Amino acid sequence: MPSIALISDIHANLPALEAVATSLRSRHPDAVYVLGDIVNGCAWPAETVDFLVASGWPMLTGNHDDAVGQLGTPRMEPRFGDRERYAQLWWTRSRLSPRHEQILADLPFEFPLSFDDAPPVRVFGGQQGQHL
């Protein structure tokens, strides 16, 4: 049976993500999956997205990623229009390039995992409508 690592709730904390990646390299999992909440929370949203893309680890979107992606779009929840209350979301969005925004927008909310000699598993990130 393969060994897998599931990580989530990174919240743009690049130094913590780098420490986790170092630990994972020493453990040699067969696969690493990122289960969302990649951005929004710390100071490195773009750098965190870049690090994860470079890692090649499959990623899901989390509720924070989806909330940031909603800003300024027709699907934005009305409450996110309160820029004072949701300043962190807006700040995070301002630090992402269009390329980063597209990467996050293209992430699925779920995906199936299957491995030999193990039952299939479906993993989920944050679901639309379940925000902050």
Image (tube, helix red, strand yellow):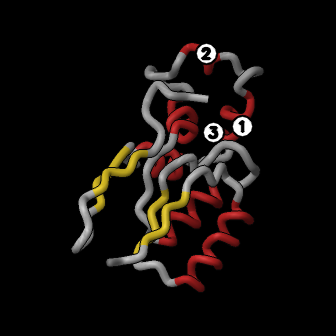
What type is the residue that disc 2 sits on? Arg
User: What residue is pinned by disc 2?
Assistant: 79
Q: Quadrant of residue 8 in the image? A: bottom right
User: What residue is pinned by disc 3?
Assistant: 93
Q: As displayed, is residue 60 above or below residue 2?
A: above
Give how far across and how far down residue 24 sits, in percent: 57, 77
Q: Nearer the viewer, mark 2 or mark 3?
A: 2
What type is the residue that disc 1 sits on? Trp
Q: As displayed, is residue 27 above or below residue 18?
A: below
What type is the residue that disc 3 sits on? Arg
Tell me which residue sits at (63%, 39%) in the image. Answer: 93
User: What residue is pinned by disc 1?
Assistant: 91
Question: Element type at marker 3?
Answer: helix
Question: Element type at marker 1?
Answer: helix
Binning the other alpha carbons within 10 Å of mark 1 as few (below 14), some (14 to 19) or many (20 upward) gives: some
Left or right of 15 in this view: 131: left
Tell me which residue sits at (72%, 37%) in the image. Answer: 91
Q: Nearer the viewer, mark 2 or mark 1?
A: 2
Q: CA distance from mark 3 to mark 1?
A: 5 Å
Question: Element type at marker 2?
Answer: helix
Q: CA distance from mark 2 to mark 3?
A: 16 Å
Q: CA distance from mark 2 to mark 1?
A: 16 Å
Contact between marks 3 and 1 (CB within 8 A): the answer is yes
Q: The C terminus lies in which quarter of the figure?
A: top right
Tell me which residue sits at (37%, 51%) in the image. Answer: 123
Q: In terms of sequence position, does the residue under pointer 2 or pointer 3 come before the other?
A: 2
Contact between marks 2 and 3 (CB within 8 A): the answer is no
Give how far across and how far down residue 114 sits, in percent: 25, 64
Tell me which residue sits at (49%, 68%) in the image. Answer: 5
Q: In terms of sequence position, does the residue under pointer 2 or pointer 1 come before the other?
A: 2
